[in-house]
Amino acid sequence: MARTAPLYSSYQLIQVMVDGVKNIHSVLRATLLTLFIVFLALLVRYFLLDRLGDRFIWSSFYPAVILAALFGGWYQGLLATLGSVFIVLSIFFVSPEAVGRKEAIRIEMLGTLVFLFNSVLVSWVADRFKKMSDKNKIALAELKEKNARWKGINENLPYSFIYQTSAD
């Protein structure tokens, strides 16, 4: 027997389309926020930490990745990581002081690999934290709802069978 596709009403189809547009807008907003955070990290590195020169290139980009991952999750953390690597490789490694120093460039490439590893790890941990936090909020709301229901049942009984230790 052939399976047929479920029939949707026009309202359901419109609702699916609206939810998709909302989702696209939230992803676009998160992406723009991530790119803005990386741009701020570049400005901090270029103007405020300029005295460091070629040392500690990644110092302002770690917080950018952490913030992006905490606010946006896994994908935003990866976007901030790749954006940071692109900026550093295109701006800081092509500086006139860095050209011709092959040993320094090799060391900085090792720093780039360490940054990539740490940023991916931070993005993953932040994503897990965010998902667990969302699950905890849902569980707490369900618990409060069940507690309110049991309180209502308990208050309507002639003799209370639930011993309350604190006043909620």
Image (cartoon, helix red, strand yellow):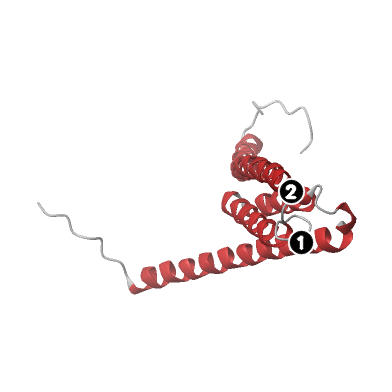
In percent of the image, x 18 and y 59: which residue is there? 4
Q: Which residue is mark 1?
A: 96
Q: Quadrant of residue 88?
A: bottom right
Q: Which amino acid is tagged 1?
A: Pro
Q: Is residue 136 left or right of residue 96?
A: left
Label at residue 62: 2
In percent of the image, x 70 and y 43: which residue is there? 111
Residue 137 in sight in this render? no
Q: Is residue 53 above or below residue 140?
A: below
Q: Is residue 18 above or below residue 67?
A: below
Query: What whole-number distance in Å separates the C-alpha atoms at marks 1 and 2?
Result: 25 Å
Residue 28 in sight in this render? yes
x and y, in percent, of residue 5 in the image: 23, 60
Q: Which amino acid is tagged 2?
A: Tyr
x and y, in percent, of residue 163 in the image: 70, 25
Q: Is residue 77 above or below residue 22?
A: above
Of residues 76 and 157, the one drawn nearer to the viewer in this rendering:
76
Q: Residue furthest front?
A: 100
In percent of the image, x 62 and y 38: which residue is there? 143
Mark 2 secondary-structure assignment: helix
x and y, in percent, of residue 71 in the image: 68, 54
